[in-house]
Image (cartoon, rainbow, N blue to C red):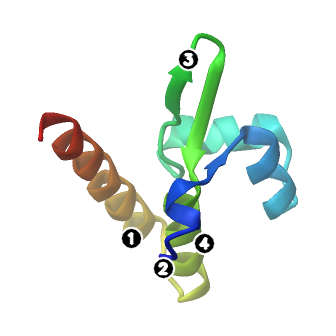
Amino acid sequence: MSRASSKVWLSDNDIAERRGQSRPHIWRLVKQGDLPKPVKLSAGCTRWPAHEIEAIDRARLAGANDADIRKLIADMDAARRQAVAA
């Protein structure tokens, strides 16, 4: 994870464009547990931390299967909760 990407937020449009997928497909992936839930930054504004999406993409490129990705996402969610509690 680079320092720059840890401060970058991605919209559903950004992710869809990066992956060559549609916005509705991005939201289906979230619902299925294959992408983390976005962070609500304000009313009507949700974004994903770029470093989380990059980590998922790197895992996929390395050959991770759906179960591996879901475990990675669960770990990301736990890290978010821990960061809030700290």
State which mark lies toward you, 3 or 4. Answer: 3
Q: Which residue is mark 4?
A: 57
Q: Residue furthest bottom?
A: 62
Nearer the camera: disc 1 or disc 4: 4
Sequence-first disc among 1 and 3: 3
Q: Would residue 10 appear left or right of 85 to someone viewing this image?
A: right
Q: Would you name the residue on which mark 2 appears? A: 64
Q: Is 54 placed left or right of 77 in the picture?
A: right
Three-letter residue code for mark 1: Asp
Q: Disc 2, disc 1: CB below 8 Å?
A: yes
- SS at mark 1 in the image: helix
Q: Amino acid at mark 3?
A: Ser
Name the image quarter holding the C terminus. Answer: top left
Q: State the CA–CA distance, disc 2 to disc 4.
A: 9 Å
- Between marks 1 and 3 in the image, the one whose residue lies nearer the viewer: 3
Residue 77 position within the rendered picture, expressed as x and y whole percent measured from the top left: 31, 46
The residue labelled by disc 3 is 42
First in residue order: circle 2 vs circle 4: 4
Q: Quadrant of residue 19?
A: bottom right
User: Residue under circle 1?
Assistant: 68
